[in-house]
Image: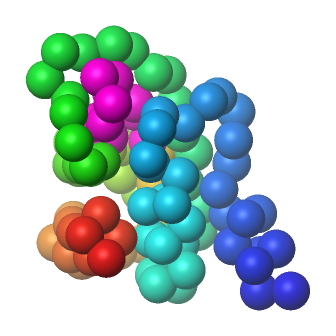
Amino acid sequence: MRLRAEQGKLKIEHSIIDGLRPVLERLLRDSPGIRSVIPGVIRPVRNARGLPNVRITVPVTNGWKAIALSAGARQELFISTDLSKDELELALHSACHG
């Protein structure tokens, strides 16, 4: 039942770049303060190699916008949460490297 709730928090409107889905699932599992993650548009980039990396960019109405880089692409992420930027950065770091 818990797994279903976690999957319900990951709103998949678009594809997800390679290697990012497990990171987002860990983030949602380990951070109960995150209401949902909505992956956005994917664009090709040259400097995105190796393990997925996520950085927070700007606040939005109900949380934060972030950019994920992996597998030669970048993807916008909209993270609905009440966590502060520092708390979310720590959670993202743990999810990316955990």
Rendered residue at 69%/41% (across/down):
12
Locate residue 72 relative to residue 1 in the image: left or right: left
On the image, the x and y values in percent for residue 87 come to: 24, 77
Q: Position of residue 84 (x, y in %)?
A: 26, 72
Residue 22 position (above or below residue 2):
above
The boundaries of the magenta stretch are 68-77
**At x 43% / y 61%, what residue is drawn?**
23
Quadrant the C terminus occupies: bottom left
Q: Name above or below for residue 3 compared with residue 56.
A: below
The colour scheme applied to this rendered structure is rainbow
Q: How many marks?
A: 0
Residue 92 part of the magenta segment? no
Say which quarter of the image contains residue 77. top left
Q: Is residue 10 left or right of residue 26?
A: right
Quadrant in the picture for the N terminus: bottom right
Is the stretch drawn in magenta largely helix, strand or loop? strand
Can residue 39 be seen in this snapshot?
A: yes
Q: Nearer the viewer, residue 15 or 91?
A: 15
Q: Residue at x 77, y 86 (%)?
A: 2
Question: In percent of the image, x 46 and y 84: which residue is there?
Answer: 30
Q: Residue furthest right?
A: 1
Residue 62: x and y in percent read 48, 55
Query: Would residue 33 be seen by someone viewing this image from the given angle?
Result: no
In the orientation shown, which residue stands out farthest toward the front? Answer: 50
Front residue of 66/93: it is: 93
